[in-house]
Amino acid sequence: MGKQAFRSNNTVVKPLPLTAEFADQAMLLTQQVFKDDDQESIKRCFEEATRPGSHTDFMEAHECSDIRYWVAIENGVVTGVTGFYNEIPTPEAIWVGWFCVHPDHRKQGLGTDLLRFTIQRAKDEGYECLKLFTSDLDDERAAHHLYERFGFVETHRESRENYEAIFLRLDLQT
């Protein structure tokens, strides 16, 4: 087994780039957390991240590119996922993609470490802002306070079939 990214007693998580070795675990965790989302889209995103070019039609239809993910791993198990992707019409911004923490590992600082990593990575790569969307569903509502703490602000909402989509933005140039 390779390196591990984990938290134990004040240790900061250092996420590892997603590899084929952990892709299925990361995808299953994401599908578990986002059970009300399009499961096939989640699958395609993770496949595209580990095998770029495998879902060109999907990427073009969603106007996105450069999907990348990082994982937190403890004892060979994926405990958290973060990532981002470019939306082709807005190259100055990057979107957080499928950010989640396993329910058994919440309230331990893992989400904070993963989000801090994602923000720093976007800054290091020169993006002007980081965007994400969440919802008013219970499983996603839990992370709203985390986004607020990091300075994300709501830009707008959209009504969807079973939930309200909430769009957030964090300016990285300040």
Image (cartoon, rainbow, N blue to C red):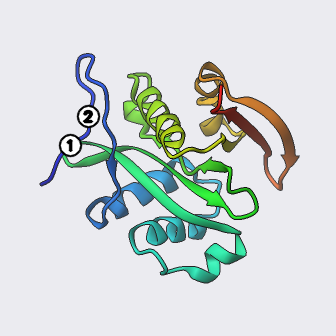
Please determine whether, in this image, residue 11 is positioned above or below residue 49.
above
Secondary structure at numbered mark 2: loop
* Along the line of sight, the residue nearer the viewer: 88 or 1: 88
Name above or below for residue 100 compared with residue 37.
Answer: above
> In which quarter of the view is residue 50 placed?
bottom left
As drawn, 149 above or below 55: above
Which image quarter holds the N terminus?
Answer: bottom left
Q: Position of residue 37 (x, y in %)?
A: 64, 57
Determine if residue 136 is in view.
Answer: no
- The three-letter code of the residue at mark 1 reads Gln
Q: Amino acid at mark 2?
A: Phe
> Could you tell whether 33 is left or right of 165 in the image?
left
Is disc 2 in contact with disc 1, using a CB cutoff of under 8 Å? yes
In which quarter of the view is residue 169 placed? Answer: top right
Q: What residue does disc 2 label? A: 6
Identity of the residue drawn at 85% across and 39% down:
156
Q: Is residue 6 visible?
A: yes
Residue 122, x across and y down, in percent: 53, 42
Identity of the residue furthest to the left in this view: 1
The C terminus - image quarter: top right
CA separation, marks 2 and 1?
6 Å
Q: Would you name the residue on which mark 1 appears?
A: 4
Q: Position of residue 66 (x, y in %)?
A: 53, 64
Residue 67 x %, y %: 52, 62
